[in-house]
Amino acid sequence: MLDFFTIFSKGGLVLWCFQGVRGPAATAPVNALIRSVLLQERGGNNSFTHEALTLKYKLDNQFELVFVVGFQKILTLTYVDKLIDDVHKEFRDKYRNEFQQKGALGLLNGTFDFKDDFMRLLRDAEESSKVRAPTVMKTFEQSLKSQKTVKCMIETRGEKPKEKVKNKKNKGSKKDGTEAVAAPTKASAGDKQLSAAGEKEELTKDEILQKNREEFFRRHMKAGEKSRSPKPDAQKEKGKKPRVWDLGNSNAKVLDYSNSATNGSTEACPVEEFDPDMALGDKNREPGRLYDLEYESDDEAEEEKVVQNPSKSSVKKGGLGGMFGMLKGLVGSKSLTRGDMDPVLEKMKDHLIAKNVAAEIAVQLCESVAKKLEGKVMGTFTTVTSTVKQALQEALVQILQPQRRVDVLRDVMDAQRHRRPYVITFCGVNGVGKSTNLAKISFWLIENGFSVLIAACDTFRAGAVEQLRTHTRRLNALHPPESHGGRTMVQLYEKGYGKDAAGIAMEAISYARNQGFDVVLVDTAGRMQDNAPLMTALAKLIAVNAPDLVLFVGEALVGNEAVDQLVKFNKALADHSMAQAPRLIDGIVLTKFDTIDDKVGAAISMTYITSKPIVFVGTGQTYCDLRSLNAKAVVAALMKA
């Protein structure tokens, strides 16, 4: 039984609605569909799940209509796809003239009497799903077993069935008797002549076995001679020599901790020479400002000129020249069909995959663009390629723009007014750069006037606490207490290794509240998404401490793995949380962005699969190499040929 069926325009005007079950109206699920799918360019799949309902929809781009049907997701209704196609065709044909003549404003006073037609189509769809052809079993003549002869089933002693099958595939033109006795290796010229003439079938079993033995010994004798061939062994130098790096001897004594007995104590650690310019990088930067991600391309301006003037490019590329070459690639004021777009979409899909977009997401993006453009009437002087490319660019920009903007500075100031610290938890897989980018974010917060407490909750990896201790010492050297009225701007809260991470985070938040710190940055251990015990510990840390922001740190180098990581992290946080509304990932930190050139597809994959914004982008090795995402710059790099 259907819950509802509604037809509305893309402008939001409901034209007709059917309510099949008594209960709340279809407003909430339809609004969720519009907000999460249609506006976010996620139309690759024609179904959407909202709470206990499954929604299926169909777009009519010619008349700007949307057809939506909703039913309980526990039901398996096989006739829904047929019903929505039939309703779409019937409704469009019945009121075609009104759509063309009245337009969008004229539909406000229009009436659409469609209930009788809908009930008829619904009955037909239900009856068609019940009437199915019964499954008929295959006869013996239709099976593969009937095609086998008795001769091919007879096995000769000493033969291997696998070798027989292999010989049948490779030498299908020979007779069955030849296949049964032929050796898998190369035969002599005399054997080939015998097999071709069919004389080998007359040999006895003893002769066949003797020939096989001779061939076996001949083959292994050749292999033994090859293996006994002398090979000059290179003389290896005994002992190991230390590798000498360029510019690597300047601080060798400082880095030598072999005779140190300090055990990582902050006070006893040797103070190395520290150059602030190396840690800051850009000297002309504005302190505390988070710059947008930039991408400059000389080829992009040329591509835009070609798209804006398609007639010029078609004249150059046309084989006939002149007017015929110009009109070769134009649509000519007709409705776009799937056949027109398929070649272009196939190239676009391969291009996205080559730019590191996950294959599954690239397919869904192209499918969404096809549904958005199918049936749409194009202009006279517009090519299919430029139209599809423009639609794909708009879809990519829409995906990268977040549904909810994460403004960390505003949220920190709001937490200050309530006299509590703002807590950010970092999570991710091993080696993605959580600690390094945590230090970058700490530096950015300090330059904006906020004090930071770093909670060392990575109690598993050797050297994790020492790494944060080094970052803390360097950040205090860049922003000493004397420059902030005697206030220590960054401090490390640590309890060593092997302790409970959730307990350390709780103690750190309590300490920050008592000492008046503005922000608490919780560093967690790297863990693979398939490690159930570590994922349980992460879910416990988030559930117990309830941070204000949970950031997933991911590499810009990954492709399909980004989808698997985010999906399984969210699933693990939901499964292992004891709350009814589990806390999931709130945002993404994209690291190592400076190593990928224009292969920026990981940004699309991560935002598409989670609908969460990319809050920070790491672009280098200094504390200032932190950027905010610029959607247009990423799409420009992605669409570059």
Image (spheres, grey):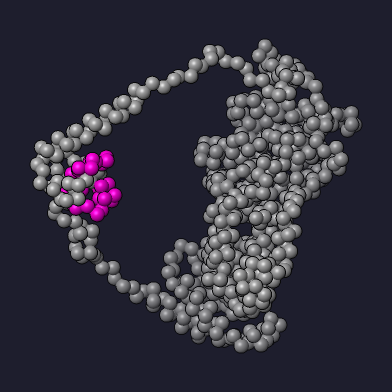
Instruction: Indicate the quadrant where residue 249 lies.
Output: top right
Instruction: Indicate the quadrant where residue 616 lies.
Output: top right
Residue 415 falls within the magenta-colored stretch:
no
Whole-percent x, y for residue 450 in the image? 82, 39
Whole-percent x, y for residue 373 in the image? 61, 70
513 relative to 232, above or below: below
Q: Image check: 322 left or right of 374?
A: right
Q: Image check: 221 left or right of 613?
A: left
188 relative to 87, above or below: above
Q: Is residue 424 visible?
A: yes
Q: Nearer the viewer, residue 252 or 56?
A: 252
What residue is drawn where x is 67% and y is 75%? 322
| Magenta segment boundaries in residue numbering | 165-191
Q: Image check: 289 left or right of 396?
A: right
Figure disc tally: 0
For the C terminus, which image quadrant? bottom right
39 relative to 435, above or below: below
What residue is drawn where x is 73% and y is 26%? 470
What residue is drawn where x is 19% and y is 63%? 140
Whole-percent x, y for residue 101 in the image? 66, 88
Residue 177 falls within the magenta-colored stretch:
yes
What residue is drawn where x is 72% and y is 33%? 454
Q: Is residue 269 visible?
A: no
326 relative to 470, above or below: below
Whole-percent x, y for residue 416 in the image? 81, 43
Q: Nearer the viewer, residue 462 or 325?
A: 325
Q: Nearer the viewer, residue 237 or 84?
A: 237
